[in-house]
Amino acid sequence: MIVFLNGTLVEKRLTPAPASAVIDVGGVGYEAFIPLSTYDALPREDSPCKLLIHDYVREDAHVLFGFSSAAERDLFMLLQGVSGIGPKTALSALSGAQPRQIRAAIASSDAKFLARLPGIGKRTAERLCVELKGKLDPLEAAAADGGPGDRAQADPALRDAVLALVQLGQSEETAVERVRAAAARAGAVKDTATLVRLALSAH
């Protein structure tokens, strides 16, 4: 089983879909299909390149899927565990949003956001929420400040504040909602203590 490829990037292509990359490893060229986020992260052609690989083997196929990060590969594997989602659909979905956004949407059962991903319709989005419930940390819903559609980087203070409120007896859903509201009020100051204080003082 191939776990990663480390060599020279020979070629990267956007068309025909899906995007792909060819890496020369010791004189052997390996082609891997990749999401758009990985394509954007690739260096220029003829440069050193490393891709994490999911080695997809079936009786009638042997296909490599490549990723620039473990987060992408892990989510790719998770999506494939849902009925009706194969590797190509999972790859398309990863091309529509950042991994943390997709994970946050699943954790918060945001089927509307998931349905907008390439290859994912309304019914598949609902299956994602149902079948992956319990396989993701519910607190990942707090990772996207303001919701899964926000492009800002995940703030660990949000997660810590949610954990603190849960320890104080609040449900995870309520804790996430209150911390998000507190983050909006806090502005640039978003340390855990401030978020917890604002979340408690508002109710």
Image (tube, rainbow, N blue to C red):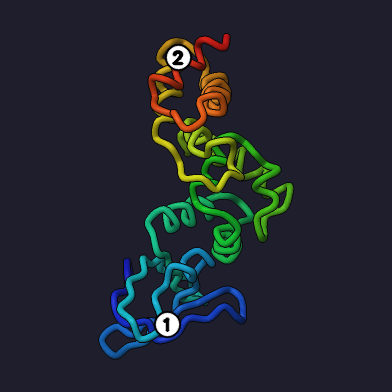
SS category of the residue bearing label 2:
helix
Q: Is residue 24 above or below residue 117?
A: below
Which of these two is toward me, 63 or 67? 67
Decide if residue 118 is in sight here.
Answer: yes
Q: Are marks 1 and 2 in contact (CB under 8 Å)?
A: no
Q: How far across and how far down the image is residue 99, in percent?
A: 50, 51
Q: Residue furthest left?
A: 26
Q: Earlier in the sequence, mark 1 or mark 2?
A: 1
Q: Residue at x 60, y 63 (%)?
A: 92
The answer to which image quadrant residue 149 occupies is top right
Q: Which residue is mark 2?
A: 197
| Spot occupied by residue 108 in the image (x, y as percentages of width and height) | 58, 34
Q: Residue furthest front?
A: 188
Residue 1, can we see it?
Answer: no
Instruction: Look at 72% across and 53% down and name the residue there.
Output: 121
- Name the residue tied to disc 1: 22
Position of the C terminus by quadrant = top right
Give residue 153's position: percent from left, percent from top.
46, 45
